[in-house]
Amino acid sequence: MASGTWNESIPGIGTFFVGIDIAPGRYRCDDGKGGWWVRFTGPRGGDPVGSWPLPAGPTEIEISPNDFAFETHVRTYWRRVADAASGSDPGASEPRPVTDPTLRAELDPLVRRRRPLVALAPFTVLAAGFGGLPLLGSMWLLGMTMLAALVAIGSPTLFLDLHRAHELDKRRDRYVTPDDLDDDARALLTRVQAAVDTVRESKVNQEGLLERAENAVILPREEWEIAHALARQSRLRADEPGPGGELPGVEAALRPLREKLDRSVTAVTRRVEALERYAERVRAADEALLAQRRVDEITGRAHEYDELLADTVRDDLALPEIEHLTERTDDLLTVLRARLAEPEDE
């Protein structure tokens, strides 16, 4: 699980949250020979699918917006070559999973503490091979040696990632997937993520004209807090009985609770709208930046216009000379016409 910025490439080794560390889409690795990858699909990443070993040469992988995480172990890196494939409904938009921004910082130290134990795993397997040699023979030792080699290759990532996944499962309340949300909540989270993406991908942010450090901290926190509130609202709405599903006395008791839920939805919606207003201002700033650069480009060519004007003024100074040539031409024309008018000698 990498704690890097969300960009258009994926390091060759690590586990990454989809929509948090990496964007969904089609990725290409120039040489995946001998490597492997795992996509954690399904609710909360509970249905992993993978490929091992990868063939020599380029390989591609489609990471879906519904994937929870992507684990990779290749010697190069992955670069995004296309956006995520659209579904059957072009207008449909599925929000990406959202994780508490502090969760990665919490899990990484837990994993690092297990690293020394993982490093000893190959030696433990090899010791078992030597221990069983007198009873089981040389084939046993050979098999255990090969197993130790595989453990040595895979343990730095595989076992640590399994430990990370176990710790992550114990913190289920620290991330939200689309399956945790009802339709209303998904629509609001989609709006939040569209606003966050607008700010994150803007020119003014990428070039440091905004408070980029603050955006890197505040935007993920806003996205998480809103997503967490939306998930709680979805659970409460799912538990509510339908119209006429309760006795009159129970309906009366539920009414103030529903009013509180409605006030919560209103408060979250205002927060979403505030993010959208911020994104709109950032979009306007991008347009102003583009206009300013166009003006700078035009201003930078002002000397060409000055030179053109100076040349035009010099052309005005040549007018008397041209007029003199015109007068001489008129004199010549008069003489020629006079000659044409004279009768020819017989």
Image (tube, rainbow, N blue to C red):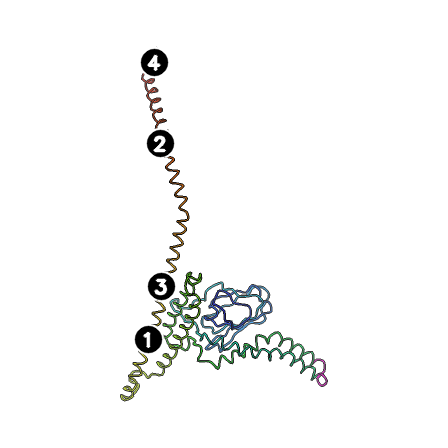
- Rendered residue at 39%/56% (across/down): 290
Label 2 neighbour load within 10 Å: few <14, some 14-19, many 20+: few
Residue highlighted by disc 4: 344
Q: Quadrant of residue 143?
A: bottom right
Residue highlighted by disc 3: 281
Q: Is residue 66 left or right of residue 11?
A: left
Q: Is residue 94 above or below residue 138?
A: above
Q: Nearer the viewer, mark 4 or mark 1?
A: 1
Marks 1 and 2 sit apart, C-alpha to C-alpha, by: 76 Å
Q: Which residues are magenta?
A: 133-139
Tally of marks: 4
Q: Secondary structure at mark 2?
A: helix
Q: Are marks 3 and 1 in contact (CB under 8 Å)?
A: no
The three-letter code of the residue at mark 2 reads Leu
**Is 105 a magenta residue?**
no
Residue highlighted by disc 1: 267
Residue highlighted by disc 2: 319
Q: Are marks 2 and 3 in contact (CB under 8 Å)?
A: no
**Where's residue 307, x and y in %?**
40, 41
Q: Secondary structure at mark 3?
A: helix
The three-letter code of the residue at mark 1 reads Ala
Marks 2 and 3 sit apart, C-alpha to C-alpha, by: 55 Å
Q: Residue furthest top?
A: 346
Q: Is residue 59 above or below residue 156?
A: above
Q: Quadrant of residue 292?
A: bottom left
Mark earlier in primary sequence (4, 2): 2
**Where's residue 244, x and y in %?**
28, 84
Marks 3 and 1 sit apart, C-alpha to C-alpha, by: 21 Å
**Where's residue 297, x and y in %?**
41, 51
